Image (spheres, rainbow, N blue to C red):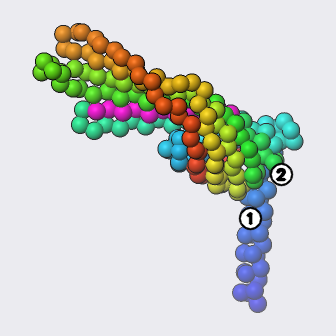
Amino acid sequence: MKKVLVIFILTGILSISSFTVNYLSAQDQPFRIGVKVGFPQIAGLNLEYVTPLLQKRLSADLDFSYLSLTSDEVKLDYTNFAIGANYYFFRDGQGLYGGVAYDRNGINATDNLINDEDQTVQGSANIGVNLIDLKIGGKHGGLFYFRWELGYRISLNKPVLDVVATSSDGTTVSKSFSYPVSNGLIADIGFGFSF
């Protein structure tokens, strides 16, 4: 009898806690903070706020990534910043959504090179790309959640690669090169916490 009572109590506690976690929707937990892994952010931070607009189905969304890699004398910095909005189709701040965002990607590379006169030249190259992201995704869970996104990015500018070389005597040479348009796919997954 004691075993049955303990099982009944534990089942009740688990049911209540499961209901509580699943019930914590946008009305109670409008802020989300999490991480995303995929493309274009590679790995970064995601913030979302579910507004009271449109029956609590419209949210503001922010993604930010910064990666710095160094190999020998080459240093590469990558940044991705996106700000936009998501619209949840069926529930307030939960389930399937569509989104649109302004996205800015930047790459900056520096390296020490030897030129034709055996001088050490510090070179740098950078590029910035402005894009519009169109995506569809899903947010699943309550207090702790999992999300996924798929979409397409459309370039707003024709990217230009700026290259600057500065020799040890202070002479600077710069050149700009056209870079292919950066349209492409979006694919990521994320995990986070609602509060």
Q: Secondary structure at mark 2?
A: loop
Give the position of the N terminus as an image quadrant. Answer: bottom right
Kind of residue at badge 1: Ser
Q: Furthest-left residue in view?
A: 118
Asked whether 51 or 171 is in front, the reply is 171
Judging by the rendered image, the residue that carries numbered circle 1 is 18
Q: Is residue 38 left or right of residue 30?
A: left
- Give residue 3's position: percent from left, percent from top: 71, 87
Residue at 61% in and 34% down: 154
- Whether 170 is among the magenta residues is no
Q: Is residue 108 left or right of residue 73?
A: right
Visible residue check, residue 158 = yes
Q: In the picture shown, does residue 125 fall above or below 39?
A: above
**Pointer 2: residues within 10 angstroms few (<14), some, or many (20+)?**
few
Q: Earlier in the sequence, mark 2 or mark 1?
A: 1
Corner quadrant of residue 10: bottom right
Q: Nearer the viewer, mark 2 or mark 1?
A: 2
Residues drawn in magenta = 74-84
Corner quadrant of residue 133: top right
Number of numbered tags placed on the structure image:
2
Q: Is residue 30 left or right of residue 173?
A: right
What predominant SS class does the magenta segment belong to?
Answer: strand
Give the position of the C terminus as an image quadrant. Answer: top right
Judging by the rendered image, the residue that carries numbered circle 2 is 90
Kind of residue at badge 2: Phe
Asked whether 61 or 78 is in front, the reply is 78
Visible residue check, residue 28 = no
Q: Furthest-top residue in view?
A: 170
- Give residue 175's position: percent from left, percent from top: 36, 17
